[in-house]
Amino acid sequence: MRVEEIHPMELTLTEEIVMLSLEEERGIHVPMVPHALGFALAGALLCDFERLGAVCIEDETVCRTLESRPLPAFLAPFLENVQGRESIRHWIAWFSGQRKNLEKAGLDNLVAKGVLEHRERRFLKVFHFDRYPASHHEERQEARARLRRVLADGNGDVFDTSLFAILCACGLLRDVLGGSDIAPEVADAAVRSHPVARVVKAETEAAVEEVLRVQGNPASPFSI
């Protein structure tokens, strides 16, 4: 396992998922299937932990390591939950349940770095809305360019291929790339080759099926 260090202004995988889940101008979520963002953030968090040496992922199992590089401050509290050995599925379920806290931590960090702007709106002095439009567009454009390179030839470093696979797994890649068509076989291959993304996809599809079951709608909207 190659352990990386993160420059203070470099974005983590978790931050990139948060950033790419938002519309640039309006700062609201792009369309997505139910619970997709929670599973995507949980997968990104595990990948960040692994590349920083905080956990080791082998044979569908996550194991806390004794030493790691210093984590970004907003990720450190989430690592405190990881002890011993548990399955990837266990931690995807656990951290997806922390979606609001994890997303808020990522948003705050992106605002502090100047990537996003925080705008608050109140309606009738009762309802409160937070929006996070882009302060500038370089980071998002650069992330999309890297994703398009992976889509074009399948090549990329661990960070980019993980980002690509997780976005495929939760059905967000098409919207992130502005409606670009993603061949199902390309998306499936990316997900199958990535142990965390496989679980993200399985959990997202199961969540969608449960929502449809409760609603009495047999037609699944989930697509890569």
Image (tube, helix red, strand yellow):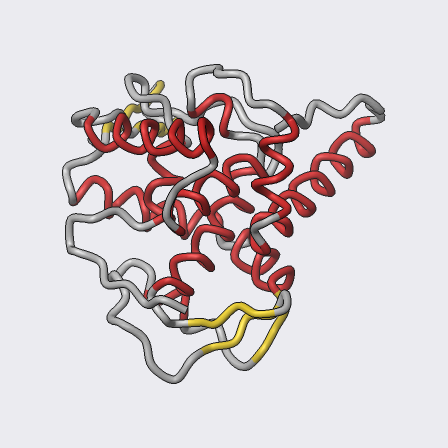
Image vertical order of residue 117 relative to residue 86, above or below = above
Residue 177 as seen in the image, left or right of residue 141: right
x, y (%) of residue 67?
33, 81
Image vertical order of residue 19 relative to residue 80, above or below = above
Residue 169 as seen in the image, left or right of residue 175: right
x, y (%) of residue 198?
63, 49
Image vertical order of residue 179 relative to residue 213, above or below = above
In the image, 183 versus 83, the foreground residue is 183
Residue 6: name its quadrant.
Answer: bottom left
Quadrant for the N terminus in the image: bottom left
Residue 14 as seen in the image, left or right of residue 34: left
x, y (%) of residue 111?
20, 40
Residue 17: name its quadrant.
Answer: top left
x, y (%) of residue 97?
55, 53
Query: Residue at position x 34%, y 41% from top?
Result: 16
Query: Residue at position x 82%, y 33% from top?
Result: 213
